[in-house]
Structure formats: structure tokens, C-alpha cells
Image (cartoon, grey):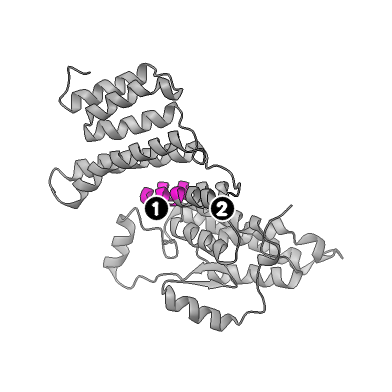
Amino acid sequence: TSRGGECGLRYSLDLSALKKKEQASAPNSMYTRNFPVRKPKRSTTRKSENRGKNNKNDDDYSNDSNNPTRKKWMNELQKRMAELRQKAEGHDGEDAEHLVTQNLCDSALGLACALNKEDAVMAVLDIMQKRGIKQEHSTYQSAIQQCFEVGNANASLEILEAMKRVGMKPDATDVQLVVATLDRNKQWRKGLELIYDFVEERERSGEDRGVIAVESYDITIQSMQESSSSSSTSSRGNRGRSRNNGRDCWKDALQLLENMQSSEFHARPDLRTYHAVLLTLMTAGRAEEATQMVLSMPENGIIPVAHTYNLAISTCHKGGQWRKG
């Protein structure tokens, strides 16, 4: 059965009042008919344009018209919108109600939201209203999936919050898609926070909304290691904040591993999880922690392999404890 039902689009809301209310709390975005639509940011100077191109954490896709990936997705959106409009009008004497499906609307709406195309979002919502198609759980999940495909982390977070706003509870699949999108955009701390929030909510409510897949944990820990590695490299000429951030990543990785081992609401760690944590320890040169972790693996049901020992030995050498290695 589909989830969402009466928590769908509230067409009776005063749209102008809703815009003003949401804009007051979030100047750069608005929620139109309970569905998030990000306002395009307009770069007016050459400096801001260059900053957007060089900053890999900047996922404002509204203005990057020279991005070939964005062009591909924009073409795809045009195709989906054209198909939706054609079927909404009906052709060859067919009834539009049987042509405009939930899946078709979800697909177009999700991609429009991922690309921050407000006009396309509004057009799809209008068609859904006229055809009596509600905003279901599948609508949000389609949008989150499209955000992952496009790489728009900010939009995926907004969609997740919009679900909660209308009383729709995200499940494990929803959260792990957002976590993956955040990790791709080097925002692993936000992804880690989502994992902890989801697990804590499950513990409080007792509701079974699934378990976030272990792959999401592995990717998040890998993102920690990459962040730590890049911070260590940049800190050679800068002894400031980046060095501290890189040094702290291994602590987050170990804490997450400990939670995975002790809580039934977390995914159980696998061999790849341990290897990912070892890489963060190796980057930080934490020989003692790496040695203890490898020795504890069998009692947690994970048998070390040759690559495990190689990582541990490399960590000991980097940490200046070659005798342990």
C-alpha cells in the first residue's frame, strides 16, 4: 500500500501566505504546496561565478549552464515534461486520467526539484491537482533519488525535511539516499548526523522503518578518510582549522563503529567497514587504536584478511611504532 494518503498536497492552502511564511524562516528557499522548491541564486559578478566553479561543495545547479551533466539532466527534464503535458491533454480520444499516472508525475516532479526548476515543479503540481493525483511517499522518494542522480545535496535535505513537515516519516531507504548524496558532496558530517537522528528516532518510537544499509556507513567512513587525507595535505602549509578537522575524523569513525557493534538499530559492520575505519586511523597515524581494533575483530565475528594486516602495519609505521607493525 502507498504511504502518504491524507498527508499529500494541500491545495486549499493560501499559496502566497505560505510563501511569505517559509521565506521568512529560509530566505534562499520556499516550500510550495508542501513541496520544496529552491530559488535560483543569481551570480552578478565574475568573482561569484568563479567561486561557484571552484567550490566542490557548492551544489547550486541553477546557473551552471555550461555543465555538461546538468545539460543532460535538463534535456531529460524537458522530455519528461513534454510527455507529461501531452498525456495530460489526452490524444487519440484517450482519457487523460488513464494516461497521467502517479509514477509519471513523481518522475517529472522529482527531477524538476533536483534541478531547482521552480516553474517545472509548479507545472507538475498543477497537473497533479487537476488530475486528483496526491503527493505520496513515492513522490518524495523519487525526488530524493533524482537528487542523488543529479548530485544536489541541499535539495535532498530540504525534501527530507518537507516529508517530516507534512507528517510523513522517512524510512531507511530515504535516509540512506540522502546520506549518499551528502557524501558525494563531501558533507559527511551532515550524513552522519542523519544516521544518528534516524537511529535515535527508531529507538524512541519503536517503529520499524528499516535499518540503514551497511553500505551507507562504509561510504560515510570513506568520506571521513578522504576528508582527513585532504586536510592533512593542506595543513602542511596551514596549521589552522583544517588540520584539527582532519585529525578528528578517526574519532568519529571509531565511535560509529562502536555504535554499529553495540546497537541493533544500526547496521552490523562488515569487513569493508573495518577497512574503512583502518584507513582513517592510518591517515591519522593512530597505531594503538588500529592494533586494538584488528585484535578485536574475531570476537565481533569478522575475520581479518591479508589486506587488513597490511593496513594495520602501514598505520603502525606511519605512527612511528614499527615494532608493533
The residue that label 2 is drawn on is: 205
Q: Is residue 314 above or below residue 249?
A: above
Q: Position of residue 79 (x, y in %)?
A: 63, 58
Q: Quadrant of residue 104?
A: bottom right
Q: Residue at x 43, y 29 (%)?
A: 272
The residue that label 1 is drawn on is: 190
Q: Residue at x 72, y 59 (%)?
A: 102
Q: Residue at x 65, y 73 (%)?
A: 10
Q: Magenta part of the protein: which range?
A: 179-196
Can residue 186 be seen here? no
Residue type at mark 2 is: Ser
Q: Position of residue 50 (x, y in %)?
A: 29, 61
| In front: label 1 or label 2 | 2
On whether residue 185 falls in the magenta region, the answer is yes
Whether the residues at callouts 1 and 2 have beta carbons within 8 Å, the answer is no
106 or 175: which is nearer to us?
A: 175
Please name the predominant secondary structure of the magenta segment in the image.
Answer: helix
